[in-house]
């Protein structure tokens, strides 16, 4: 299942290591609507992207609408900022700078990082 999610990210442009969940029980993607979902065996998984020292939490169910270079209306993904967990609602790779990945939270905050920090295995 993980391989299918990695292949979808590769096809659409965001870094392949963006969803580093290992125990994926179910993966689905509706090409017509762009809706994607992942169900994992554990209740939640935390992953630290070491190159940017950023911890991200993935719920048992993660959903998003995906299109070329962008994941939007994301559910089930949170990032830790100043001791608070903030929901990540959008991730995109700007066309003008494809070496960057920008994350947007539900509070409107956004931050950009080097795409290399989200390569497979990071």
Image (spheres, rainbow, N blue to C red):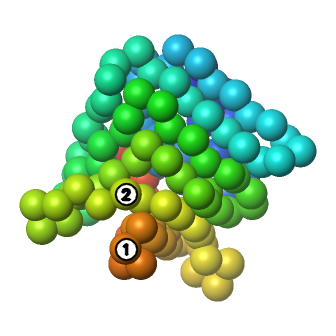
Q: Position of residue 97 (x, y in %)?
A: 58, 80
In this orientation, does residue 110 appear? Answer: no
Q: Which residue is mark 1?
A: 107
Disc 2, SS? strand
Residue that extends furthest to the bottom in the rendered view of this protein: 96
Q: Position of residue 39 (x, y in %)?
A: 51, 24
Label 2, residues with CA under 10 Å away: few <14, some 14-19, many ≥20 = some
- Residue at screen point 72% across, 43% down: 35
Q: Earlier in the sequence, mark 2 or mark 1?
A: 2
Q: Is residue 25 above or below residue 72?
A: above
- Say whether residue 58 is left or right of residue 120: left
- Say whether residue 98 is left or right of residue 109: right
Q: Position of residue 64 (x, y in %)?
A: 61, 48
The numbered disc on residue 87 is 2
Disc 1, SS? loop
In this orientation, does residue 44 appear? Answer: yes
Residue that extends furthest to the left in the rendered view of this protein: 83
- Residue at screen point 32% across, 23% down: 43
Task: Please identify the quarter of the rendering in which residue 122 is found.
Answer: top left
Of 16 and 111, nearer the camera is: 111
Q: Quadrant of the N terminus?
A: top right
């Amino acid at each position: 299942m993980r391989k299918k999610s990695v292949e979808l990210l590769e096809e659409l442009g965001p870094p392949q290591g963006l969803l580093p969940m290992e125990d994926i029980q179910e993966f689905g993607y509706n090409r017509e609507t762009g809706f994607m979902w992942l169900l994992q065996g554990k209740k939640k998984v935390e992953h630290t992207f070491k190159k940017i020292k950023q911890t991200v939490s993935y719920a048992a169910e993660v959903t998003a609408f995906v299109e070329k270079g962008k994941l939007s209306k994301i559910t089930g993904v949170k990032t830790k900022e100043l001791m608070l967990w903030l929901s990540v609602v959008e991730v995109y790779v700007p066309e003008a700078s494809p070496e960057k990945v920008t994350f947007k939270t539900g509070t409107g905050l956004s931050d950009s990082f080097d795409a290399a920090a989200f390569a497979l295995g990071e």
